[in-house]
Amino acid sequence: MPYSGIAEVVVNKKVGPEHFLMRVLVPELTKEAKPGQFVHVRCHGEMDPLLRRPLSLHGIDYEHGTISLLYQVVGRGTRLLAEMPTGAEVDIMGPLGRGFTIPEKAQNVFVIGGGIGVAPLFPLVQALKHYKIEQTILLGARSADWVIGTGQLASLGVKVEAATDDGSLGYKGFVTDLVGKRIKVIKPDYFFACGPNPMLKALLEVTRKSGLDGQVSLEERMGCGVGACLACVCKTVASSELLVASGNGKTVDSGEWRVGSGTEKTVREFEYKKVCSDGPVFGAGEVIFDD
Ligand SMILES: Cc1cc2nc3c(=O)[nH]c(=O)nc-3n(C[C@H](O)[C@H](O)[C@H](O)COP(=O)(O)OP(=O)(O)OC[C@H]3O[C@@H](n4cnc5c(N)ncnc54)[C@H](O)[C@@H]3O)c2cc1C
Ligand code: FES
């Protein structure tokens, strides 16, 4: 059962143009937490905003019973969160969702973050380091000051490459283009990624072309956060398709998904999954981004 209750704000400080790092003391939650999972936070003690806001586990300190949240202020909920002083009490629920899993075959991986999508990647990077897996971190943002966490990642002794839209840091262009170039040189055997849907869609086009498998963490608007309201569904390849591919026959029928163009369209089956409880992390081969 996930923890649901009060956590004490230990730190809440500005770390970027619109970015804050909050550390909260919540030992009951921390002991169960895994990289890629998230917490559902009530940003205010009163009724507005009513819904909790999902935020990824950015840091997990099992020893001291704290978790860190790295968040960007984009609206009312995150603005209220940014105003919370040290010592404040925040209502928090978690850990929620399915996090990253590290496949045994992975020896040399890409860890790719777009914008605030960098948030859940830190505990993953630490886990990969623990298992002595070679990793290259590729981060994309609009400009140098929007690339968050490079110093912290570099202090872990991992290779970090940046891509910025204006070229003020690293490669000039999208991180997905940088990935396309670096795949050919570094030849990773797996990838993990988190970012906005347009970035993940472009990334899957690049990785699929190279036959590179991986996992993606999706960002969807959420309601309940625990699989009850269907606010967060995303389209995935039907498990029947995955079963057919592995020779196990057809069991699910929930819709059609057309790929290709003109007369070459192929009908595939799809099904909806809940980002909050089936994800937020999905296999790269599972997710369907519509045009
Ligand atoms: C599993 C998960 C983990 C997340 N982890 C983080 C994190 O670690 N750090 C972080 O800064 N953000 C994270 N997000 C996004 C975060 O939940 C939203 O930015 C937040 O809920 C916005 O709340 P708000 O009240 O400030 O803004 P709102 O007023 O609710 O919205 C402001 C703007 O942001 C857009 N928006 C709101 N929520 C989302 C969303 N989930 N996906 C895409 N666009 C959205 C709205 O459409 C609107 O344009 C995560 C989302 C998910 C689903
Ligand atoms: S947010 Fe309610 S089902 Fe996912």
Image (cartoon, rainbow, N blue to C red):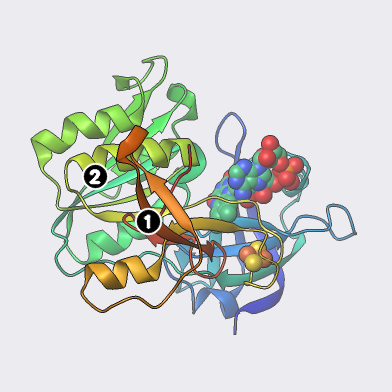
Mark 1 Cα-neighbour bin, 10 Å: few <14, some 14–19, many ≥20: some
Outermost residue toward the front in this view: 263
Q: Quadrant of residue 69?
A: bottom right
The percent position of residue 226, horizontal first and vertical second, equals 63, 72
Q: Mark 2 points at which residue?
A: 208
Secondary structure found at label 2: helix
Q: In the displayed structure, does residue 126 sit left or right of residue 14?
A: left
Disc sitting over residue 86 in the figure? none
Residue plotted at (63% across, 57% down): 54
Quadrant of the drawing holding the N terminus: bottom right
Q: Mark 1 points at which residue?
A: 268
The percent position of residue 227, horizontal first and vertical second, equals 62, 72
The answer, for residue 283, to whether it is visible in the render is yes
The percent position of residue 204, horizontal first and vertical second, equals 32, 43
Mark 2 Cα-neighbour bin, 10 Å: few <14, some 14–19, many ≥20: few
Q: Which badge, 2 or 1, is on the more N-terminal residue?
A: 2
Residue plotted at (44% across, 52% down): 257
- Viewer-proximal residue among 124 and 195: 195
Q: In the displayed structure, does residue 168 sit left or right of residue 159?
A: right
- Viewer-proximal residue among 29 and 171: 171
Residue plotted at (51% across, 60% down): 57
The percent position of residue 258, horizontal first and vertical second, equals 41, 47
- Viewer-proximal residue among 15 and 182: 182
The answer, for residue 78, to whether it is visible in the render is no
Task: Kindly identify the amino acid type of the residue bearing the numbered disc 1.
Answer: Arg
